[in-house]
């Protein structure tokens, strides 16, 4: 049987480091994680943790769970949504609340890109902390989760931005190489993914005089750019009509001419999955408009549902399609010329938009979402202490393991070309080097130092491989171990060299003095 003290001796443990990264990945963290041998990558985007990498991942998982105590782990052997429903559907009384659960889950990422490395791999690992509670308690738990995660991220050297939007909090790490654009109000904490958050509506001048609508012949003028040139006007004065197939329905959405649709907001309004929405085919467009693509408009449109972005209702004397090939209508105004089935926020937010909650404007924030917290009302109810029926709420915090490890590596690189892992995710505090294992005094002294560190309740790894001492130093730097103990040229005197890679301090000590010289 292998003794615990023998477990982390590299002479009998699988480890392999590399001189270079064979893939064109833009993040240095992925280069370091590959070169250190903590992860293995393939050109199809697949990755796995090596035995050494799994130790780092397990240590980080332990730190996360320590920060979020009180959540009971359960096994997930089916769909996440369905499994969680089995629990919250059984909650009928306030006496059962809050129920706090934890599970780890992996899911395939259809949008992976090899160049984005571990920030966007083929397979993601999420740690999910879910609580079921009443509305007020859910809000309190959400704040506790945010505080706990911020504390953890601060401990590992990450400064994350909290962006709040419509029950969703995104914890975003700033990056010069963002995966997507986030927006944040310049005067409050509102913000989120630009594709999914709502922004305020810019209003037209109230003094503008209403003009009578007029049909205009616009041969082969179907795009917004062509309309701007034809009418000599800005796209902000046009009404764009987009037609979608949403499930079994044909849905038309009216946007200002310079705007893009937010499929996320549209799906949320319709109460369906975004994957169920697609642009209408040419045949569907012809069926709804009686015209070719590029000439759709709200007047006389034959769609199951006509939705209007709130910005459009402020337009006066706008230009829109006439539902007739090669024709548009000018001087169109909401209310007088058309009435939609519903008005809402359907545009994709962008920098410079108004904040929904104050007088601020939205600014671009380039970053990567490391974690998120979502609070939402469920479709079930429970009885409170007064036997009154109340709606049940859920709070769900998700931490993406691969992104978190990558961000930690990005923030904790050092001048040596390696890393110094923070305590919260470092399985070893010390890397003990036997300079030349063929020299008994060096190997024996290294083993004695290794055992002394373990006796003091500290963690260590012993490099007792038959490698050059220079290679061992390089591997130590790649693995990011902070403390280094070297049994080398001073071994004949019974002395080891002790280094702190973070502070740069060094000293010499005997085995008896070693405990007093640990950082």
Image (cartoon, grey):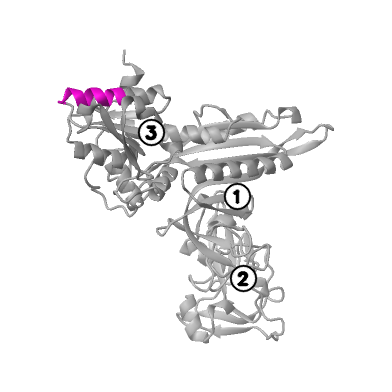
Q: Nearer the viewer, mark 3 or mark 2?
A: 3
Quick one: label 1 or label 2, which is nearer the N terminus?
1
* Numbered label attached to residue 298: 2
CB within 8 Å, label 1 to label 2: no
Location of the C terminus by quadrant is top left
- The part of the chain drawn in magenta is 438-449
Q: Which residue is mark 3?
A: 517
Q: Is residue 465 left or right of residue 513?
A: left
Q: Position of residue 113 (x, y in %)?
A: 35, 51
Label 1: state its secondary structure: strand
Is-magenta flag for residue 373? no
Look at 28% across and 31% down and name the residue there. 496
Q: Nearer the viewer, mark 1 or mark 2?
A: 1
Q: Which residue is more in the foreground, 304 or 441?
A: 441
Label 3: state its secondary structure: helix
Q: Residues within 10 Å of mark 1 (few under 14, many from 20)?
A: many
Is-magenta flag for residue 439? yes
């Amino acid at each position: 049987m292998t003794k615990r003290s023998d477990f982390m001796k590299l002479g009998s443990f699988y480890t392999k480091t590399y001189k270079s990264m064979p893939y064109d990945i833009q993040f240095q963290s992925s280069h370091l994680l590959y070169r250190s041998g903590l992860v293995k990558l393939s050109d199809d985007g697949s990755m796995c943790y090596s035995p050494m990498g799994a130790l780092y991942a397990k240590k980080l998982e332990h730190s996360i769970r320590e920060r979020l105590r009180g959540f009971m782990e359960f096994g997930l052997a089916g769909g996440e949504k369905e499994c969680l429903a089995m629990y919250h559907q059984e909650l009928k009384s306030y006496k059962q609340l809050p129920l706090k659960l934890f599970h780890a889950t992996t899911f395939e990422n259809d949008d992976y890109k090899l160049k984005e490395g571990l920030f966007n791999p083929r397979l993601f690992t999420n740690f999910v902390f879910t609580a079921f509670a009443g509305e007020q308690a859910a809000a309190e738990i959400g704040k506790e989760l945010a505080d706990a995660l911020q504390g953890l991220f601060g401990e590992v050297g990450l400064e994350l931005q909290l962006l709040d939007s419509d029950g969703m909090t995104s914890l975003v790490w700033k990056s010069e190489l963002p995966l997507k654009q986030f927006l944040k109000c310049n005067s409050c904490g509102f913000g989120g993914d630009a594709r999914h958050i709502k922004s305020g509506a810019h209003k037209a001048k109230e003094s503008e005089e209403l003009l009578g609508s007029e049909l205009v012949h616009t041969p082969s003028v179907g795009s917004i750019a062509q309309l701007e040139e034809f009418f000599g006007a800005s796209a902000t004065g046009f009404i764009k009509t987009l037609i979608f197939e949403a499930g079994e329905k044909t849905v038309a959405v009216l946007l200002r001419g310079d705007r893009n649709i937010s499929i996320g907001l549209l799906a949320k309004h319709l109460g369906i999955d975004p994957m169920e929405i697609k642009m209408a085919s040419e045949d569907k467009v012809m069926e709804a408009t009686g015209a070719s693509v590029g000439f759709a408009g709200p007047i006389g449109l034959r769609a199951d549902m006509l939705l209007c972005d709130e910005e459009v209702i402020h337009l006066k004397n706008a230009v829109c399609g006439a539902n007739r090939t090669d024709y548009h209508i000018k001087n169109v105004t909401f209310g007088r010329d058309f009435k939609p089935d519903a008005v809402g926020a359907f545009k994709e937010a962008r920098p410079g938009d108004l904040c929904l909650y104050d007088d601020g404007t939205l600014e671009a924030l380039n970053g990567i979402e490391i974690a998120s917290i979502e609070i939402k009302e469920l479709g079930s109810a429970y009885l409170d202490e007064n036997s009154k029926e109340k709606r049940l709420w859920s709070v769900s915090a998700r931490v993406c393991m691969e992104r978190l490890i990558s961000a930690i590596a990005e923030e904790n690189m050092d001048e040596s070309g390696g890393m110094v892992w923070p305590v919260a995710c470092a399985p070893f505090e010390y890397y003990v080097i036997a300079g030349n294992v063929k020299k008994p005094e060096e190997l024996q002294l290294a083993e004695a130092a290794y055992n002394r560190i373990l006796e003091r309740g500290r963690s260590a790894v012993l490099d007792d491989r038959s490698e050059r001492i220079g290679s061992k130093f390089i591997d130590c730097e790649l693995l990011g171990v902070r403390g280094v103990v070297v049994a080398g040229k001073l071994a004949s005197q019974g002395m080891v060299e002790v280094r702190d890679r973070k502070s740069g301090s060094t000293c010499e000590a005997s085995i008896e003095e070693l405990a007093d010289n640990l950082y």
